[in-house]
Image (tube, rainbow, N blue to C red):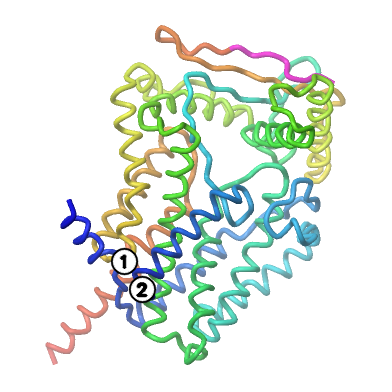
Amino acid sequence: MFTPKVIILGGIVVFAALSLALKENYPLSHYPMYGDPDPVSQYYHLTDGQGKPLPINQLTGVRAANLGKILRKRLNDRAKDMKINVKSLPPAERDRTSQETLDYLRSQAKHHKQVIPDKLRIMFTTIRFHEGHVLEQPEVFYAE
Amino acid sequence: MKNALKWIWQHLFPLPEVGRLEAFIARAMLAYVLLEFFPIFTPPAVQPVPVGLAHGFDLTWLGHTPTLQLYRIIFTGVLVVYVLGFGLPVVLPVLAVMQILPFTLTNSQGFTNHSHHILSVVLLAQALVAVCFPRGAWLQPLGIMNSWLLAASQAGIATAYLISVCSKLLASGGMWLFHSHYIALDLVKTMRQNYYSALDPRYATDPPNVLWMLEHPTATAVIFDMGFFVEALIVLSVGTRWLALAFGIATIMMHRSINALMGLEFFQNESMLAVFFVNVPFLIALLWAGCERKLLGRR
């Protein structure tokens, strides 16, 4: 009954099921990248208090792509704790999470022996493609 | 249809024969890759959003440079024993845990870096095999154990791709193949993220090939859907030689094309595909055996 074929197939099924159930728990992952392609895309970046972009990776070791991941994860966790949808998160909770993220970035800058400005902003930009052009709409997500 | 399924089942997951030379080269190559991709920078000494083992253990002790340097020396020593093939039932689980811990800490910062998962998956799969084959495997792995080590490594890698396919289908409500052309917009996003990471002017423009994709959604969908099918079907080549080689090359080409488009790197995945699917150790062993035969024939 337990032929190599059955053992390998069983292993594949168990490993896949565990990974999909436990999601991001290293070394398991459900590899969600580019899982739901959408006509609108978004990204976050870091600026100083005047809106001048900062090279976040050089300053903190955190890449711009990971700023969005950190923020989304923290916002989702906060919403989960409050038993509400992330879109219904009160502005005060969103701001608190954003400030905690900036505090984390400051601790990482210290770890990398870098100095970052006293006032920071998290920018949120929406991208869409319309009539042959890439359109971008930046907005301030959170400002200190 | 029934006959086709029967044929697939009969030919699914054969256990490949693996010689001692091939097994040694595979271990040496895996060890090289593991050492090459061991963390160069000390991870932060905090775990604000713990994942995996960090849920139960404080791993912040790995966030100190002298500790990590010592850890790396011990890891290198264990790798040497692994390459020699001694005590695999103990060495492989130790190696797997040692490799997983620092990356668990780096992934406990609130964001996930998927670069190293594939290496940990291969080590876990091999450790599982080694634990199940303790008898007679202490001084040198047995022939059957080498076969299982290869098949399990292939299965681990292929399953990682299969999980990605399942996630795509689940997240998109089964519509991924029809929405895949929107990934071109994600390519623009990735360019912007690359730019804002270091304000690198190389990423300040929209590459012409990405703009072409945005203007040609059907052709773009065909290109991305081909990658989807490669990821979904690579699992069928587990245990094979030449089919695995074909899927290995196709998957590496997929990663290379993503790299050309988005600047994302997949060195770890590509190296694991080269070792366990393209079967570079097997090809070297084959070449060696051919040379040996030729030399003996001359005598």
Residue A4 sits above or below residue B226 on the image: below
Q: Which residue is mark 2?
A: A4
The chain identifier of the residue carrying mark 1 reads: B
State which region is magenta.
A137-144
**Do the residues marked 2 and 1 share a common chain?**
no
Q: Quadrant of residue B90?
A: bottom right
Majority secondary structure in the magenta region: strand
Q: Chain of mark 2?
A: A
Q: Position of residue A92 (x, y in %)?
A: 84, 21
Q: Residue at x 81, y 31 (%)?
A: A116
- Residue tagged by mark 1? B13
**Amino acid type for the residue under numbered disc 2:** Pro
Nearer to the camera, B40 or B262: B262
Would residue B140 appear left or right of B93 to someone viewing this image?
Answer: left
Work out how far the residue at label 2 is from the one at label 1, CA to CA, in angstroms. Answer: 8 Å
At 49% across and 60% down in the image, what residue appears? Answer: A14
The amino acid sitting under disc 1 is Phe
Q: Is residue B240 above or below residue B1?
A: below
Where does residue A69 sit, x and y in percent of width and height? 65, 35
Tally of marks = 2
Q: Are marks 2 and 1 in contact (CB under 8 Å)?
A: yes
Q: Secondary structure at mark 1?
A: loop
Q: Position of residue B33 (x, y in %)?
A: 50, 63
Q: Position of residue B163 (x, y in %)?
A: 46, 49
Element marked by disc 2:
helix
